Image (spheres, rainbow, N blue to C red):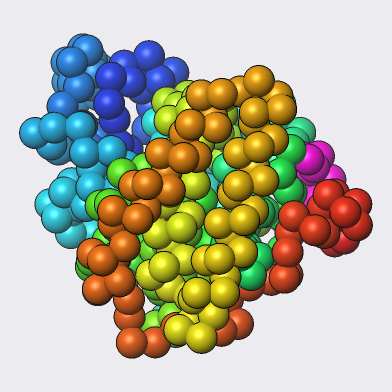
Amino acid sequence: MKKIAVVILNWNGEKLLEQFLPSVISFSNEATIYVADNASTDHSIQFIKDNYPTIKIIKNDGNYGFANGYNMALQQVEEEFYCLLNSDVEVTENWLTPILSAFENDANTAIIQPKILDYKNKDFFEYAGAAGGFIDQYGFPFCRGRIFETIEKDIHQYDDDITIFWASGACFFIRKEVYRKLNGFDGDFFAHQEEIDLCWRAFNLGYTVKYNSKSTVYHVGGATLNEGNPKKTFLNFRNSLLMLLKNLPKKQLLPILFIRMILDGIAALKFISQGKFKHFFAILKAHFHFYHLISNNLKKRNTIQKDNYYHTKSIVYSYFVKGGKVFEQ
């Protein structure tokens, strides 16, 4: 059995599979390739069978989103290391070799992310992950190479291998034993920020998340749910609150959640001022869903919550008030 399983979650993504599977097939000799299908209604499965018979197909019986879609599929995958790969990612030659070496050289490294560049503009980092993720004290995520709407050009400023806080779900490597110990992604999230929650839970248990610049992939981004979609706004705001509820240290839980409520209110008012009323209502809906899920998610809190989880106190203040547009600032 090969050590790495590349698992691509698919839902009605025949065109994406047609475009991006060739690079995965060409450059992944070290891996067994799987497509986990969330009950697609297009011709995705037949396309794979006709063109890539070596790919293993896992059929879920419904569209369970990113989180539970992977949770269900990975029950059937026994390779030592998982690569959860978006269907809109182009991989490069030898992309798996440095990842495998990093896992084998450090037993405490549980999760790894490669350098993620923009498929449409290959000299620049891609929004979802860039050169590794961090959060601020209030749970707002940001990346080296991408802070809010500022995307950096790749001029090799992040050609290093460092410890990060979270790895992007666009190309997410994790040890099978750690994934199963953590019970995988939180199914309540459905999609968006479930990878940050998983990395936070791993961090609380003492595992390390790494960025590896020696491996590069190109991500389209927004191919399944674009940035302007109110559903994405709903999922991001709701899931961010759930993540804080589950992982914050006990003493910080109520104060941080209170401040986040205020900041979310400001964001909602900003959407109104921009005439984006669907996004305003998406934030309201996110909060009502969060209240409904509080009791169940309080039960998911681990006994250990570390208080050194954040990289900076407020990325909002640093970016919008102090003018820090790149990670160095």
* Residue 32 visible within the image: no
Number of marks in the image?
A: 0
Quadrant into which the C terminus falls: bottom right
Say which residue appears at 31% left-offset and 16% top-offset: 14
Image: magenta residue range = 150-158
Say which residue appears at 46% left-offset and 58% top-offset: 241
Query: Horizontal and vertical percent for residue 260?
Result: 58, 59
**What secondary structure is the magenta-colored segment mainly?**
loop
Say which residue appears at 58% left-offset and 35% top-offset: 218
- Residue 158, compared with residue 287, is above or below; it is below
Query: Horizontal and vertical percent for residue 193?
Result: 45, 51
Q: Is residue 266 left or right of residue 21?
A: right
Front-most of 234 and 143? 234
Splitting the image into 4 quarters, where does residue 180 fall?
bottom left
* Residue 245 visible within the image: yes
Query: Horizontal and vertical percent for residue 59?
Result: 12, 34
Indicate yes or no whether the magenta region holds residue 216. Answer: no
Q: Is residue 153 left or right of residue 66?
A: right
Query: Horizontal and vertical percent for residue 110?
Result: 42, 71
